[in-house]
Amino acid sequence: MLVRLALASLVSLAVTAPASAVPVQQMSSADPEFSASVHTISEEYRDRMIGVSWEEGCPVPIDDLRIIEMNYRGFDGTVHDGGQLMVHKDVAADVVEAFGEMYDAQFPIRRMELIEEYDGSDDASMAADNTSSFNCRPITGSPGRFSIHSYGKAIDINTIENPYVKGDLVLPPAGEEFLDRDDVRPGMITKNDPVVKAFKKRGFDWGGDWHSLKDYQHFEAKKS
């Protein structure tokens, strides 16, 4: 798998990332390679963020954020271009490598759009089964405390297939269909699968391992 990173200046740098050892399906020889580019935030997009996903007082300046553009495998079995994630610059390379391993493992993603497409609403993004990262917002159920998403160091993947579950609360509500984690269907993240392995070996924690609640969609890096 060849991962192409275009860092800040948009000069391409080619690096090789390891392929997953546990492919879900047989890859087609006609499939394009995984590719990704990492960009600083343009002035135009910065203006779009302010008052939506970012405002004064957020714990990370916009200058420390990056937009990753990448291709991904959809639930329709085809490769889609134009997926976008906004993450902290310190984790951008690790995120690219993890998604590259997911791509090689044939793991499907419903959609990958920046949170501004949903007016900064985490609920709307989850309802759309969107894979996303940065959004300056509180921890779910804990007003006044910044979520790790506010640092650009957390990622939610296929939110319907991998819901947040705390007691009787299921977010998004459509995720109730996927509460039986033994009934594994496309797009679900399960213990020790290629998605979990890809992120854990890069220092991310998985919300599916938590005890007081389960956040199956959620991976987070430690704040630094």
Image (cartoon, grey):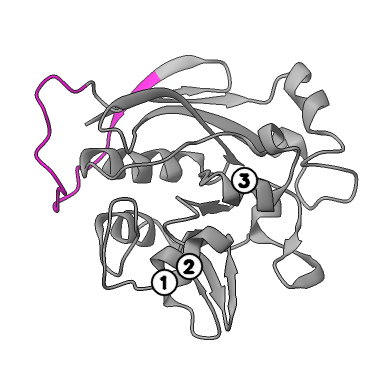
Asked if the magenta segment contains residue 14, the reply would be yes
Query: Which amino acid lies under the numbered mark 2 shown in the image of this protein?
Result: Glu
Between marks 1 and 3, how big is the CA–CA gap?
A: 19 Å
Pinpoint residue 131: horizontal percent, then vertical percent.
51, 44
Q: Which residue is mark 1?
A: 179
Q: Are marks 3 and 2 in contact (CB under 8 Å)?
A: no
Between marks 2 and 1, how big is the CA–CA gap?
A: 5 Å
Query: Which amino acid lies under the numbered mark 3 shown in the image of this protein?
Result: Ser
Question: Would you identify the image quadrant in which residue 106 lies?
Answer: top left
Vertically, is 97 above or below 219? Answer: above
Count how many numbered circles sit on residues in the image.
3
Circle 1: element type: loop
Q: Which residue is mark 3?
A: 125
**Residue 2 appears anywhere in the view:** yes
Asked if the magenta segment contains residue 90, the reply would be no
**Residue 35 appears anywhere in the view:** no
Between marks 3 and 2, how big is the CA–CA gap?
A: 17 Å
The C terminus: image quadrant = bottom right
Query: Which amino acid lies under the numbered mark 1 shown in the image of this protein?
Result: Leu
Circle 3: element type: helix
Which sits in the foreground, 186 or 22?
Answer: 186
Residue segment shown in magenta:
13-31
Pinpoint residue 63: horizontal percent, then vertical percent.
73, 33
Q: Residue at x 42, y 40 (%)?
A: 110
Q: Which residue is mark 2?
A: 176
